[in-house]
Image: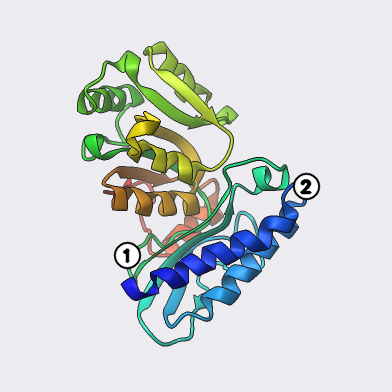
Amino acid sequence: MQHLVLDFLKVTESAAIASLPWVGSGDKIAADDAATSTMRRQFNQIQMNGTVVIGEGEIDEAPMLYIGEKLGTNSGPEVDIAVDPIEGTTPTVNGQGNAITVLAVAPKGSLLHAPDMYMSKLAVGPKAAGKINIKAPLEENMKAVAKANGKDISELTILIQDRSRHEEYINTIRKAGAKVFLFNNNDVMSAISTCIESANIDMMVGVGGAPEGVIGAVALKCLGGEMQAQLLPRNENEKLRCIEMGIADHSLPLSHK
C-alpha cells in the first residue's frame, strides 16, 4: 500500500481546501458536504478496491462516504477505509482552529466495521501501552498509567471532551489529584497527543464517535500507543446494526495497540 500514500494525502488535502470557503460561515452542512464530495471524487481516482467500513451516514446523515460505500477504480489492492471529512465541523464554521480532514486506510479486514455510533475510549502513549484495561475502574487505569510514565497520580494530565456526560470522569480524576484538560472538539488529535512527548498528555478518556475512535486507534498504533474502546449502542436499532455488521457481542472491549 506504500505506493498509495501520496494519493491518500491528496484526498485529505483536497477536502481541506474545498472546505476553506465555509470557514466562519456557520453552515455545518455545506462545509461537510464540500469536504465529503471532494473526498469521494479524489478517492475514486485511486487504483484500489476500497470499502468504507466506518464513516459518516448514520449519526450525521452525510450524503456520501457512508458505511459500505465502494471507492476507487475497482482495480488494485482491497482496502478498508475509515473517514471523517471534517474532524471538527463546529470549529471550522465558527472560524476556530484545530479542525482536520482525516482518514485511515488499511488492508481489507484490518479495521473495525461498525455503525456510526458512540463508543467509550481510553487512549495512552507508548510507555503505558499494554498497561490499561477499559473494563477496570478509572482510578486503576490512572495508577497503571502513572506507574508506566514514572509519575505520581498528582502529576497526570488527562484529556476529556467538555461534555456533561463526562462529569463523573472529571470528578473522579480531580478527586484523585490529577489534572483535567478539557477540549471541545477534535478527539482524534486529542488521542494522538498522548503519543507526543512534548504535549505532556498522559491519557485521553471519554465517550465519543466511533469513526473518530477507529481513526485515532490507527494513529496510535502507528505511533506505538494504545487505544481501547467499547461500542455503546443507545437503542435496539443500534444493537441490531452491530449484529448485522458482525459484532455479536458489543459489550466486549476493542483493543488497538
Q: Amino acid at mark 2?
A: Gly
| Residue 168 x, y percent position in the rendering | 48, 22
CB within 8 Å, label 1 to label 2: no
Q: Secondary structure at mark 2?
A: loop
Q: Which disc number belongs to residue 26?
A: 2
User: In which image quadrant can residue 108 be found?
Assistant: bottom left
Q: Amino acid at mark 1?
A: Ser
Check the picture and name the quadrant holding the N terminus: bottom left
**Residue drawn at the location 33% of the way across and 17% of the way down:** 155
Q: Secondary structure at mark 1?
A: loop
Task: Give the left or right position of residue 203, taking residue 68 as reference.
Answer: left
Crowding at dot 1, Cα within 10 Å, few <14 / some 14-19 / many 20+, comes out as few
Task: Give the left or right position of residue 3, taking residue 40 as reference.
Answer: left
**Residue drawn at the location 25% of the way across and 19% of the way down:** 151
| Residue 72 x, y percent position in the rendering | 49, 80
Q: Which residue is mark 1?
A: 110
| Residue 57 x, y percent position in the rendering | 60, 62
| Residue 180 x, y percent position in the rendering | 46, 22
Q: Nearer the viewer, residue 162 or 93?
A: 93
Real-space CA distance between mark 1 and mark 2, rounded to the nearest whole angstrom: 36 Å
Whether residue 167 can be seen here: yes
Q: Given this view, does label 1 or label 2 mark the residue nearer the observer?
A: 2
Compared to residue 201, the image places residue 69 above or below, namely: below
**Residue drawn at the location 52% of the way across and 51% of the way down:** 117
User: In which image quadrant can residue 159 be found?
Assistant: top left
Which label's residue is closer to the chain start, 1 or 2? 2
So how many labels did they put on this image?
A: 2
Crowding at dot 2, Cα within 10 Å, few <14 / some 14-19 / many 20+, comes out as some
**Residue drawn at the location 65% of the way across and 49% of the way down:** 89
